[in-house]
Amino acid sequence: MMNCCGLLTLKKEPVPLKSIEVELEVRDHVATVVSTLNYENKEDKPLEAVFVFPLPGDAAVCHFSAKIGQTQIVAEVKEKQEAREEYDDALSSGQQAFLLEESEQSPDIFSLSVGSLPPGESASIRLEYVTELAVQADDGLRFCLPAVLNPRYQPQGSEAAGVQVTSVPASLVPYSLSFSARVSSPRPVSKVESNCSLDPLQYLITDQTQATVKLAAGHKFDRDVELLIYYKDAHQPTAVVEAGQASAEAGILMGDPVVMVSLYPEFPQSVMSSLASCGEFVFLMDRSGSMSNTRIRSARDTLLLLLKSLPMGCYFNIYSFGSRYEHIFPKSVEYSQKTMKKALKKVEQMEANLGGTEILQPVKHIYSQPCIPNQPRQLFVFTDGEVGNTKEVIDLVKKNSGSHRCFSFGIGEGASSALINGIAKEGGGHAQFITGTDRMQPKVMQSLQFALQPTVVDISVTWDLPKEVSITVLSPPITALFQGQRSLIYAQLSGQSSEAAEGCVTVKYSLAGHPSENQLHFSLRPAADTGLTVHRLCAQTLIRSLEMEEREHRGQQDGGVKEKVVKLSVQSGVSSSFTAFIAVNKDSNEVIQGPLVRRNIPTPFGSSMSKGVNRCKIGGARTLIQSLPMFSLFKLKRAPRPMEYVEYQSLARPDVEDMKAAVPDQPPRDPLLQLVSLQEASGCWLLDPALAAALGKSSKEVEKSKPAKANSEVWATILALIWLHGLKMDAKDEWELLAMKATSWLRAQNAPCVTECVEAGNVLLGCSVKKEALRL
């Protein structure tokens, strides 16, 4: 009979993880995260505790240590198989050991094994990583502490073996989380927002360049913790030079100074005011089972806005995917009233009923289609990111990056940051995350504006440095520039320079046929108190590039790339897919007696996932798991290697029908979307009863107010624009592009009575919108 003391899982098994403490330090746009995991064995047998958990996909894990009593053990980075064998050997001989490794399928999943925790013993595990903070379209810097791990769908025919790890509904997670953040920047911190309740922001100095904030008490593990940090004058280019490690030899990355340059190109307003009127827009929408209910409704509304905002003369197509994929047209078609109407009819019928999350095949099919001359391809990918073959998808996007730009959207808690950020980065686009109560539409429309910006070509970066200093650029070449978006460059410096020496970096490019350049002068004197943060971010950038190169050449004779990754990972102390952190307590003279019992630490499971019966495929065997748990708790001696994922298969048809019966009636349509749905592809509105109803008026009132000489469509279109500007300015991000299209249509009509129509429309709708505000 098990001694059920302490905190318990759903299966009444004790959980040795008691609490997690997270301290975040943000310096400008770089974050250092220190997580402390506190374990305690309240059982009468020695334990092995295994915790599989998410981290940001671009995190550079750079420190791992364990404290048992007064003994502190700092882990070393070693080749992965060597580290695993050392861990197993330590457990076999009764020693305590700790192993931290990155998944081989996705860089945002880690496994932590705490081996041979004796009865009554406590252990404190310290994990540290650094990461760049992505710039959102509203200039906020986004930090996400992933708390939720959703199942990753493993495609049919995949070689992944799959092991079970543990997940329970977020409300049942039996350990606590505390989270605090310190923010500092050369510029004042204007605000910090979160999807979770925060204590008030505390400024540490009067110029507001330093501040602290904490998660409010009582936080539940039902969501990722997301912080949005806003600085005043955020778009300032910066350069940080960091001194090398004193103990490392000169000539290697860790021994030389490293510079991190952050650039924000500013494009001329004359260029930005004329958005592109061509392009091939391909929308790829996730319709797996986990996209049900509010997610799929939001996806349908978003596609409506996108289709209404496309420019006349472009081409488009819509794909959707689950275990299989569908497309509305066999190939991209020219955008017209007829093709838009047909697409919208299909969009209205979309449900989250296509099974699992096999994204690779539809992406392959899209890339197999020939590009249309003079119509640059823009791919928009929407997914909740529960994909097992992340690296394969990213590699495919990179392989085709020369022929398109890729914009990605992670939907809901637990979306894979590795996938969402990876495909946008390799596809020269922009990534957005839609979590909690975020509306999908404004973020998507911001990305469409990026896609309609003129394409920047002929990008080059040149350096002007003192003659005794040479530079080696370690970042991949910049392939995409967007107005107001940050580009990062990492470079290694060698040679000696004086304290007062300066460097200069110049980025040149061509925009809409006009040559442009941005220049930044910076001091070569190393910044104080940066630790080795920039070196580790640089090492991470280089490691990811080399890993991708290794996957491209896998199966060929040259195995040297993997050795390079292992060497760099060991030298820099930054984890990779080929290495792991290993710590063995060699100071303890006491051999731990008795058979080792495994306890899998439950990971929170997103509350937005489909309820009901989930079918999971685990190493070929099918089991039915009631309610939400992705993985079941169980005991075994050692987990099969390498760590893989369960396959998440959506519900079979009868189950889906049962679920549909339990779903409440759909809410009434939003008035804004009702008006948008009536717009023609050309940009105009028709004068009909449906428009009057959307404006909250009767057909008689609308007809009676129309100036006598006014054209019906001109009158209808001006009324719609007045309604948007007068009553829906809070949603301008969503309708701005389709309003620009309506304005262009009105100008092309060269219609009389525009002033009279604006005046009459204001009276009818109770607004006071000026003609200039409508750009007429």
Image (cartoon, rainbow, N blue to C red):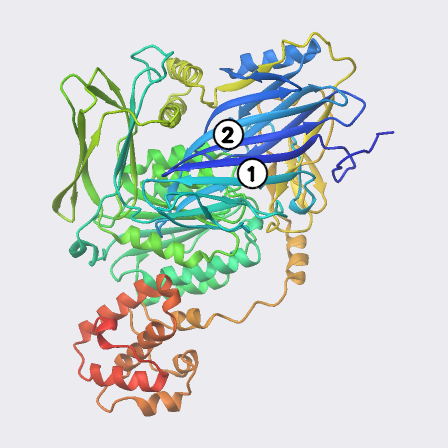
What crowding class fits label 1: few (fewer than 14 Cα within 10 Å), some (14-19), or many (20 or more)? many
**Residue 593 seen in this snapshot:** yes
Using the image, determine if residue 309 lies above or below residue 598: below
Give the x, y percent position of residue 574.
Answer: 45, 22
Using the image, determine if residue 291 lies above or below residue 390: below
Give the x, y percent position of residue 447.
Answer: 34, 52
The N terminus appears in which quarter of the rendering?
Answer: top right
Inspect the image, locate mark 1, and give the three-letter code of the amino acid beneath it. Arg
State the residue position of label 1.
152
State the residue position of label 2.
105
Of residues 773 and 614, the one nearer the viewer is: 773
Dot 2: element: loop
Of residues 731 and 645, the one nearer the viewer is: 731
Using the image, determine if residue 453 lies above or below residue 649: below
What crowding class fits label 2: few (fewer than 14 Cα within 10 Å), some (14-19), or many (20 or more)? some
Of residues 736 and 361, the one nearer the viewer is: 736
Where on the picture, by quarter, is residue 699?
Answer: bottom left
Using the image, determine if residue 498 lies above or below residue 419: above
Inspect the image, locate mark 2, and give the three-letter code of the amino acid beneath it. Gln
Q: Are marks 1 and 2 in contact (CB under 8 Å)?
A: yes
Rendered residue at 42%/80% (across/down): 690
Of residues 340 and 32, the one nearer the viewer is: 32
Dot 1: element: loop
In-image side of 29 versus 104 (left or right): left
